[in-house]
Structures are given as C-alpha cells and as structure tokens.
Image (cartoon, rainbow, N blue to C red):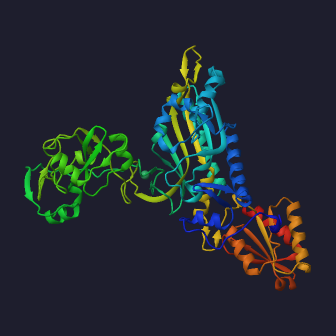
C-alpha cells in the first residue's frame, strides 16, 4: 500500500476530551474519527485492525462449533416487553418510533431476538445443542460516553448464544466458549485474566469476565498469587481470619466526645479499627435499612445492590437525624428500629464497639445477637490487597483490568419468557437452557492500545497490527534507492506481506514520527548512508531493536523475521 493513496491523517495532538491513552493514540494515529459523542468511524487504518480482530474471533468461534449469522440492530419493542427488559433497561436503551407509531430499540444485545428466533426454528432435542453468533454494531445511550472506543454509544460486539437441553449441556457449551475466549485473547497478543463476575442485568447463575490487564482499567480484579482464583472485586470474597476466643464482656456506654470517624474512635478508645462496627443507613424502596460492616472495611456496592434491591442510596446525615433521631457519627445497631443487615464478619464479632445513637457516646462490649438483632447476615465486604485467598493459603493481589469479554449462564430466563421450548427425548416440552457470550471487539482494540504503547505511539501486537511492515525511503523521488524501496514493497506484497511504504515528500523526522505513532511492528529505514554500504536498517517498533541488513537479501530477511515472530 502506498502511503500517498491511503486515507490517513495523523495528528500531533489529541483533543483535550481524550482522557485515556488509547483514545488519544487511536485519534492521533488516524485510526478512528469522531462523528458525535461516543460515535466513531473506523478509518481505513483502524479498519485493518478491526478486520484482524474479527478474523481471529471468527476463526476461534467457528472452531468451537458456533455458527455465524447476522441479526438486525433494529428490534421491535414487543420482544423486549416479553422479557421485561423494555422497562428494565431504562434510558441506556436507544429507542425510536416508526411512521406507524410502532416502537423499536436499537439493540444493546440480542438475547430476546435470538431466543425468539431459535424458538421458532427448533422444536426437537435432536436439533440441540446449538450455538450461534454474530459480529455487529450495538447501541447504548451512555449518559456520558467517553474513553473513545472503550465506552461508545455505537460499538462492535461479537455476541454468541448457546441453546442446550440440560444443565450439563450448558456447562459444556460454556466451557467451550471459555476455551475459545482464552484462544482469542491469546491470539490477539493480549495479557488477560478470566475472572468470576457478577451476573447483573443478564440474570442467570454463573458468569466470567475476560479482562485485559492495564493500569488504566476501569475495574478492579482480585486474584490469588498461588491458585487460579480470580474475581471481579464486585463479587470477590476472601478467607476471614478466625474470630479470637474471647469471653463476652458486658455492654458499656462510654463517652467519646466529638469522635465520629472510625480512626478517631479507635484511637481514642485504643482499639483496633477492625473492632468497630460501621453502621451505614441506606434509603431503599422499603424504607431505611442499616448495613453493618467492620470499621476497617468498605461495603461493596455490587453486593449491597443484591441485598437492598434497585438503587439504594446512602442517606445523608441530616435525613438520618430527621427520620431516626440518630446524630451523625454516632449511629449503632442497638435499639435501632429499622431492619439490620450485617456483614458475616460483623455477626461473628465479640466485644465490638458501636455508636450509641446519641451524641458523643459509643458502646463497648457489644455482642451481636445478644445486644441487637441481626435481620440478615450476608457477605458485604470489598476484598483488599493482602487478604487471604478464599480457596487456598495464598494472598490476594488487586490489579486493574478492562472488561473485554463476558460469559453468562442464563439458564431458562429468556427461553421461558420468549417460548423457546423443545420436545425432549421422553416427549416432554421443556425450555431450552441458554448461555450468552460477548466480546467487545472495538473495546479489544482500545484495550490492546492501553496495554501496548509508549510516549511515541502504539506498539501493536503483530497479529492485529494494521500492516506488518512499513518502508521508509528517506531519499528523493527518482533516486536509485527510491526505486529499490518500491521494488521491495512490490516483492513483499507479492509474497503476501502487508506492507505500507511512506512515499510522501516529507522529511525523515515526519516519517519516523508517523511510523512510530501508527505502530507497525517492523520498520525498514532506507537512508542514503546505509545504502552506500549496500544496507538498510530494520527497526522493531516494540523493542526499539535495530539491525542493518543487506539490501540484496532484504525481502528474505524480513519474511524470515516475520515468520519467527509469529
Ligand atoms: Zn488461592
């Protein structure tokens, strides 16, 4: 490919709104262009990367026995009404009304459509199992689209759906997808981790996320340094230290003037913060509820959601005082007239410290169960670095990740709602058992850039780079070396190498800067000086390694190098 024929405009600067490195570099390298907030065009150079990722995804999905199809983005509302998600999705769903006043959505996902479709096509256990997938644009009306391809309003997904006759079949389909995902992420050259995850809005029993590890990731993942345990911190657990065998003391009200915060109270009373019980009052749909966690721990938002239902909000101090009479900083569960939900560690505490529900006083010698009633005991804590692994003696580390793939065991939620049933071998009509499996294809590209970049630009993994080789002739048009460079270009192209030659009338500096920015893995630098010795310079973009290679064997050497690195 001739650079002068390529629709490519690189930029020195990225707009200020581009907050993260992948957004900045994909814009600067001319891979994507913004059309509206969260809506992007893949330019030819970006399209080449997208094509490569899609080809890897297709190869592994096909190998795992999934069949490609293509469903429309435009979906009638009634499908979504039947599953109940027309209302559940809220404002994130892009909706529109046609000229006949019929309501539609631009699909954020395709469970409803595919379930209704397969339900209509399949009627016997003999036609199952089945796994279908597509690669397609999806829509989500993000309240604040940002981070470029990472959180766009229109975005490319690979979504697959499996249909089985029983749980055992689902487990097999799920494992096959898990394997395929591991191969896809590996083939894209990414450093990734599969982790246990929350099922959230999808419902269903079990879920894994595939995270690309990057310090800029939006999510935290906890993983063990010894075994395979890895989970999103939304759901991660840890092994609690055994409660010490201590004799229960009597309840005592102690004066703690002006000591409201955990650190202040623990310092004042000379007790470990882990001995304090933090009492958080949440407003829920069923009125205020108290949530108790140890003083040295945070309540986990995702776990709270599953206990308190939709949209619990931490009540502000004024409302608490107005509604319950409890002064800020001195709340405690003793004598409280609202439901009490305790983290399981709190429920096991002996001789704890809590607020006394009056100004400037705390209780010591508090024993849950004896001194106050716990209505519900659940795991509410957020895992921390250094915690003990729940499955072995290992230690938990926390790293940041970019969620790029997600696997769900859906069960029968959608097949029951949308009538996807089959005749079983024994003649019974049963709902199909489903799984759904997504990969953010555009997000995968952004995640790759987050993982592989330096201060000059992108360092594409070879398997998804827009070109394999770029030739930089640093002489004038008509020079012998200019001709040699073009001959090399043609030879490489004939031999199946994806090659870009920078044939612009630009300075060496501009050509170097652009080549580094767009991140083609191998640069062939053809300058006058090296040519006098009958050589060109090869530069490996990712390592900066340089070597001189004889012009006479250049094509062979490049191809050998590409073969060795792939
Ligand atoms: Zn472990």
| Residue 90 horizontal/vertical position (percent) | 47, 41
Residue 540 appears anywhere in the view: no
Residue 351 appears anywhere in the view: yes
Q: Which of 458 and 12 is in front in this view?
A: 12
Q: Is residue 209 above or below residue 286?
A: below
- The answer to which quarter of the image holds residue 35 is bottom right
Q: In this view, does 200 lie above or below 416?
A: below
Q: Which of 133 and 75 is in front in this view?
A: 75
- The answer to which quarter of the image holds residue 483 is bottom right
Viewed as shown, does residue 16 lie left or right of 387? right
Viewed as shown, does residue 513 lie left or right of 219? right
Name the outermost residue toward the top: 427
Viewed as shown, does residue 375 lie left or right of 543? left
| Residue 178 horizontal/vertical position (percent) | 58, 43
| Residue 10 horizontal/vertical position (percent) | 70, 69
Q: What's the residue at 55%, 15% (across, down)?
A: 428
């Amino acid at each position: 490919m001739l650079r002068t024929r390529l629709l490519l405009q690189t930029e020195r600067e990225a707009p200020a709104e581009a907050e993260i490195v992948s957004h900045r570099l994909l814009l600067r390298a001319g891979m994507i262009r913004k059309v509206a907030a969260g809506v992007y065009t893949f330019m030819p150079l970006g399209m080449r990367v997208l094509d490569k990722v899609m080809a890897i995804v297709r190869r592994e999905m096909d190998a795992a026995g999934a069949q490609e199809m293509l469903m429309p983005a435009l979906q009638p509302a009634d499908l979504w009404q039947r599953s109940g998600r027309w209302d559940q999705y809220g404002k994130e769903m892009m909706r529109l009304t046609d000229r006949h006043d019929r309501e539609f959505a631009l699909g954020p996902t395709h469970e409803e459509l595919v379930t209704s479709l397969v339900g209509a096509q399949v009627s016997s256990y003999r036609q199952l199992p089945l796994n279908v997938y597509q690669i397609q644009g999806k829509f989500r009306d993000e309240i604040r689209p940002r981070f470029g391809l990472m959180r766009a309003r229109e975005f490319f997904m690979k979504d697959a759906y499996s249909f089985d006759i029983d749980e055992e079949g689902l487990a097999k389909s799920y494992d096959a997808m898990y394997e395929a995902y591991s191969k896809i992420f590996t083939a894209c050259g990414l450093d990734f981790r599969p982790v246990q995850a929350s099922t959230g809005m999808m419902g269903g029993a079990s879920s894994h996320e595939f995270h690309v590890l990057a310090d800029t990731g939006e999510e935290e993942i906890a993983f063990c340094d010894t075994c395979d345990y890895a989970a999103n911190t939304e759901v991660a657990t840890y092994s609690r230290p055994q409660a010490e065998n201590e004799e229960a003391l009597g309840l005592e009200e102690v004066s703690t003037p002006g000591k409201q915060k955990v650190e202040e109270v623990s310092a004042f009373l000379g007790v470990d913060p882990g001995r304090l019980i933090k009492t958080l009052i949440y407003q829920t749909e069923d009125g205020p509820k108290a949530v108790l966690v140890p003083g040295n721990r945070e309540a986990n938002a995702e776990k709270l959601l599953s206990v308190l239902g939709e949209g619990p909000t931490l009540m502000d101090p004024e409302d608490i005082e107005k509604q319950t009479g409890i002064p800020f900083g001195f709340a405690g569960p003793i004598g409280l007239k609202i439901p009490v939900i305790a983290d399981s560690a709190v429920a096991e505490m002996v001789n704890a410290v809590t607020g006394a529900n009056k100004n400037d006083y705390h209780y010591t010698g508090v024993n849950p169960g004896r001194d106050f009633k716990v209505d519900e005991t659940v795991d509410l804590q957020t895992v921390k670095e250094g915690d003990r692994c729940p499955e072995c003696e290992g230690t938990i580390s926390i790293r940041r990740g970019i969620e790029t793939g997600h696997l769900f065991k859906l069960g029968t939620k959608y097949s029951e709602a949308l009538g996807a049933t089959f005749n079983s071998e024994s003649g019974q009509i049963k709902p199909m058992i489903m799984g759904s499996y997504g990969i953010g294809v555009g997000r995968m590209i952004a995640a790759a850039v987050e993982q592989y970049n330096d201060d000059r630009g992108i360092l594409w993994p070879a398997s998804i780079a827009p070109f394999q080789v770029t030739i930089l002739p640093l002489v004038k048009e008509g020079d012998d070396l200019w001709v040699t460079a073009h001959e090399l270009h043609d030879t490489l192209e004939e031999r199946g190498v994806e090659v870009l030659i920078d044939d612009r009338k630009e300075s060496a500096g501009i050509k170097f800067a652009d080549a580094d920015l767009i991140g083609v893995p191998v640069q062939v630098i053809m300058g006058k000086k090296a040519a006098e010795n009958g050589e060109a310079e090869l530069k490996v973009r990712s390592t900066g390694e340089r070597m001189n290679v004889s012009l006479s064997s250049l094509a062979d050497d490049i191809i050998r190098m590409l073969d060795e690195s792939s």
